[in-house]
Image: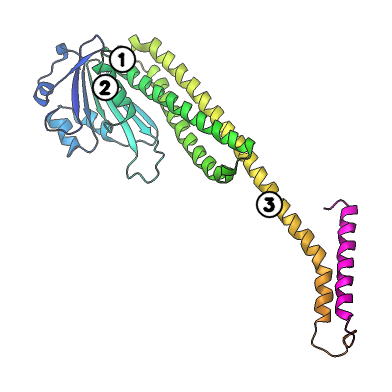
Amino acid sequence: MDGFENAFALLLDGSGGARSLTLEEARRWRASDGMLWVHLPPDVPDLPRVLEAVFHLPPQVRGPLLSDTGRVRIDVLNEEELVLLLLHPDSMPTAALPRQLRAWLTADRCVTVAPTNQHAIVAVRDQLAHGRGPRGTDLVLAFASAALSTAALRTTELDDTLSGLETRFESRREDSGDLPTDLRRLRRTLVEQRRFVSLVRDAVMRVSLLTVEWLRTQELGLRQMAERASGALKEMDALVERARILHEDVKARLDARSQRILYMLTIISGVFLPLSFITGLLGVNLGGIPGEQWRGSFLLLVLVLVVLAAMEWRALRRRELV
């Protein structure tokens, strides 16, 4: 659309395609023209004024559409207008603002406020460009399907990554030293991805329970989409459980290694403790040390220490301590 960077308006043709509209054409749109989809990025300057002056959205729509949410929020206005707010979990905790998908939908119009590069926005827009997009009121289904498709691809990638970590753990490869760090990063990503799939499922299920007239034609699709989301959530639960088991195995191996090192240090200390006591006792700076005047006293002392160390080692071996 003219004058709005990264914003666009599409007029759906009812056959899976759409054509772009200019700002003036979007202003002159009428319900008889067909389904209109307007997308605005959240960084548009003075977004509330744009929604009011350009697209003529009343305050009861602008308020919920621009509000924040911590999970999923769905408001029904005038029994025919739907406001959907969905938080997109960010795996980058340093992000300044959390990403959200906000949408206002009616039987003939849809306004979305979200980053233009969000997967659902990009996917639905690409489908419309190739004539395989939604035909009208099924835009909400298209957004959910695009989100779940992206989640499915991401799940496959995470599954491959987790399988690689499991292989490294089982094969005890040399590059497995950084395995705990890689596993910690993967578990954090899995938790974020599972939360996203859970949010999509909750949003679809809540929409399917609404009594909005123009959504009744989508009941079957919404029910199927909810089942698909539930299946995706189960797959994510399985990945999270596998990562937890691998984490416990890695931790057990590291603990066992630490225990072996501490055990060997304890054995070595036990062997050298009597030897250190004898040498320390004979090393005091006092007169009258036995053998002081005899030249062979040092060799005799070394021999006694060697024999004592051998006896200690044999005693430990007999008790199967080493």
| SS at badge 2 | helix
> Who comes first in sequence, dot 1 or dot 2?
2
The magenta span reads: 294-322
> Who comes first in sequence, dot 3 or dot 1?
1
- Magenta stretch: dominant secondary structure: helix
Residue 315 lies in magenta, yes or no? yes
Distance from the alpha carbon under mark 3 to that under mark 1 = 58 Å
Query: Is 54 on the left-hand or right-hand side of 12?
Result: left
- Residue, disc 1: 138
**Looking at the image, do the residues carrying marks 3 and 1 touch, with CB atoms under 8 Å apart?**
no
Given the image, on which type of amino acid does mark 2 rest?
Answer: Arg
Q: From what the image shows, is residue 253 above or below residue 209?
A: below
Q: Residues within 10 Å of mark 2 (few under 14, many from 20)?
A: many
Given the image, on which type of amino acid does mark 3 rest?
Answer: Ser
- Residue, disc 3: 258
Q: Quarter of the image holding residue 74?
A: top left
Q: Quarter of the image holding residue 40?
A: top left
Q: Which of the two discs, 1 and 2, sits closer to the camera?
A: 2
Q: Quarter of the image holding residue 56?
A: top left
Q: Position of residue 62 (x, y in %)?
A: 22, 31
Q: Residues within 10 Å of mark 3 (few under 14, many from 20)?
A: few
| Residue at 86% across, 65% down | 309
The N terminus: image quadrant: top left
Q: Position of residue 71 (x, y in %)?
A: 40, 33
- Residue, disc 2: 125
| SS at badge 1 | loop
Given the image, on which type of amino acid does mark 1 rest?
Answer: Asp
Q: Nearer the viewer, residue 315 or 101?
A: 315
Residue 144 lies in magenta, yes or no? no
Can you see residue 50? yes
